[in-house]
Amino acid sequence: MSRALLVDLYELTMAASYHAEGMNGASTFELFIRELPPVRNYLVACGLEEALDYLVGLRFTKGDLAYLQTLDLFQPSFLDYLGDLRFTGDVWAVPEGEVVFATEPVLRVVGPLIEAQIVETFLLNCINFSTAVASKAARVATVCDGRSFVDFSARRDHGADAALLAARAAYLGGAAATSNVLAGQSFGIPLSGTMGHSYVLAFPDEAAAFRAFARRFPAGAVLLIDTFDTVRGARTAAAVAGELAAEGVVVRGVRIDSGDLAALAVAVRAILDEAGLPGLEIFASGDLDEYRIAALLDSGAPIDGFGVGTQLGTSGDAPALGGVYKLVEDLSGPKSKTSTGKATLPAVKQVYRLDEGGPGARDLIAPATAPAPPGGRPLLAPVMERGRRLGPPPALADGRARCRAALSALPSRVRSLEPARPGYEVEVAAELKVRRPDPPV
């Protein structure tokens, strides 16, 4: 399916006007998040690979052009231009998995004005969504503190594409696996799953269901024990695990999906230990998020891993980011908005990370042409030149490792679920704060 028409109409009407006016000189746009959501101290950059794939493959098909012609908005010469359009610009970006903050450019697009303008909607769509989910996953990973969690979100995500991208973003942010098989195939993400309540109900009783499942998957089945009564289900699972051990069948764990998870986990752990199964793990699921997981672990609940669904794939407490894509420079010089509440910083910029991991950790947004500050690590790096990627796509595992390292380098107050006081410091260079004179009327 062509993705060229995944634009807001005004991208095309602006482009048509630029074309008619002969305005297609070099321009630079930057994508950034205006403000952090109130419940976020940081964000995890994600979505870049989808963005680059889109730019490389940007084409208007004959069907696209035929549809646009039916709108009676565009001149034939502009439609001919779109038919030949390919993205020929340069892209700089913060790598996936890096931690970023409000107002910092995450993506920079440099190219002919029409090309750079027309890609706005798609770039915002993929960066905003994937960054939101990766950031949520990073918070869950932080509170899990070494315990694993699995993306269970596909059935609650906002569409099939969202489910696929959410699984990728969640893995980058710290999920150990996903239940989404297509995501496993597409991105090489480890898969994980147990059984549904319908499976248990399809058998004469729990024991029969547990035996059949464990024998079919003898290397480490996880049994769902709350279809009827969790405590009784735990006893049945323990009995089946002991019974099948003589056959070489390994029951790896049990899953609880409802009820008072903290109290039930304590009761289930006692049953498993009493049956001589101290290594049999307990997994929990059921509308979990980082806050509920933190409360469970703070209570001492003996839970070894979690399935996180709805709240992860929809980033439930911060479901939308205020990412924007703005013109910052063209052949006439730096550009900026000065409107109340939506002012932007002019000129092409670089973001530097200073004193990483130390008490004075902070970022500096500075003109890209200015010398790098001593000890500053630039976050934006070139990833595309003249419409071509500068290298093969990095492994998703690399972004995952980068995320883990970036989180560990943050001050503890910033990693916290609570609002950081003070927040992470992002300094803006003095040269960028100078208000440019209004253009003549």
Image (cartoon, rainbow, N blue to C red):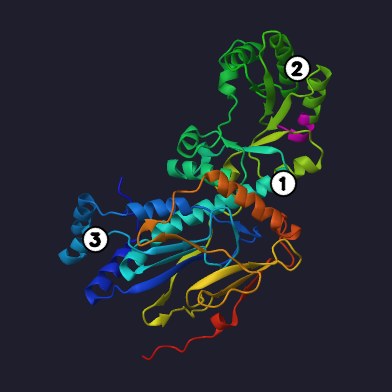
Queried whether the magenta region covers residue 98, the answer comes back as: no
Quadrant housing the N terminus: top left
Earlier sequence position, callout 3 versus callout 1:
3
The span shown in magenta is 259-265
Residue type, mark 3 in image: Leu
- What is the C-alpha distance between the residues marked 2 and 1? 30 Å
Q: Residues within 10 Å of mark 1 (few under 14, many from 20)?
A: many
Earlier sequence position, callout 2 versus callout 1:
1
In the rendering, at what x and y percent does residue 140 appear?
Answer: 66, 46
In the rendering, at what x and y percent does residue 55 appear?
Answer: 37, 56
In the shown orientation, is residue 300 left or right of residue 283?
right
Closer to us: mark 2 or mark 3? 3
Q: Secondary structure at mark 1?
A: helix
Q: Which residue is mark 3?
A: 82
Single out the residue that lies furthest toward the bottom. 440
The label on residue 235 is: 2
Residue 406 seen anywhere in this rendered image of the structure: yes
In the shown orientation, is residue 65 left or right of residue 110?
left
Q: Residue at x 59, y 55 (%)?
A: 318
